[in-house]
Amino acid sequence: MGRGKELTKEQIAAISLVSLVGKDNKEIFALTGLALRSVQHWTKKCKDAGDSDPSLQKKRTGKARLTSQRTLKVLQRQVDLEPRISAKELREKNPRLFQDVSVRTIQRLLRDDLCFQYRAPRRKPILTTLQKKKRLLFCKKYLAWEPEKWKKVLWSDKSTFTVTGSRGGKVRLRAGSDPYHPKYTKGTVKHPDSVMVWGAFGYHGTGELVVLPKNLTVNKERYLELLADHLEDCFIACQSEIFQQDGVPAHTAKLVSSWFEWVGVDYIRDWPGNSPDLSPIENGA
């Protein structure tokens, strides 16, 4: 069994002093908080030594430590700055400090002395603190809406689909044939075509599904053109009166909001960002 933690000179002196006033081992244990075995060991030494001071503990056997408190401070500072750094990289970045220290020793110091855990990083939270506050305010504000009013909301969203093609799935490959021969492989499309689709629905029905031109990026001008062409028809088809959209920049642009005011469209102005779970059109599947 390995030796326990060494006592300091002050702790040994305290045991010696308390034992001289007639305290037994259990009382010394309660007063000092030290291990009972250590107290028993040093009270016996005190009695054997008589009036002279008991001899101090022998030094631990084995090689001297190759690291110091300065080493630990350097390790902690560098890991705090670069949490992804490995023990090998720490050794390479500090050749003078760790020239005689193994990677395993650095790993042990990080784990046991500095209490660092080396694990995969956690995913960044989906919602920021500000977004959480906005969601809470939104829910409190619209909690008073009656179900009949929610039935008048026209929910809208757009989605992008990648256009790809394939001539079937698997191929028949004869044993011993080269699997990388052109007739056994298929081409790779680095930048496939995409199509954006916009749609809306309400409690009483669905609006027109609008397929935009291929590879078109929607900015505020194009989004406004889409609304001008299709929003009124969707309101009529769905018997809706209030428009809902998410908070992407093209939707919240001043150009679009000014158009809403000009044509008299009632819409939800304070939709919280990054909140697809609040919209039924995002969870239609």
Image: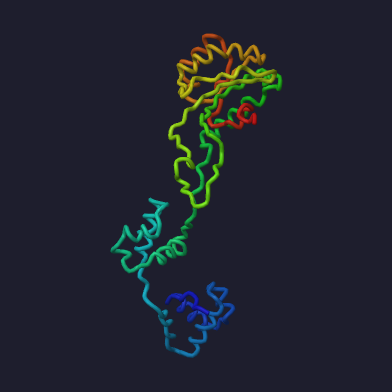
Q: Position of residue 32 (x, y in %)?
A: 53, 73
Quadrant of image for the C terminus:
top right
Q: Which residue lies most toward the left here?
A: 96
Locate residue 256, reporting x and y percent: 49, 16
Q: Nearer the viewer, residue 211 or 188?
A: 188
Q: Position of residue 176 (x, y in %)?
A: 49, 52
Q: Is residue 179 above or below residue 232?
A: below
Viewer-nearest residue: 266 or 52: 266
Foreground: 26 or 77?
77
Asked which colour scheme the image uses, the reply is: rainbow
The residue sitting at the top extreme is: 263
Rendered location of residue 57, percent (x, y): 43, 81
In the image, what residue occupies the spot 41% across and 67% down? 105
In this view, the residue in front, 180 or 246, is: 180
Q: Quadrant of residue 272?
A: top right
* Residue 144 lies in quadrant: top right
Q: Give the answer, above or below, for where 5 lies relative to 231.
A: below
Q: Is residue 49 above or below residue 204?
A: below
Figure disc tally: 0
What's the residue at 30%, 62% (across, down)? 95
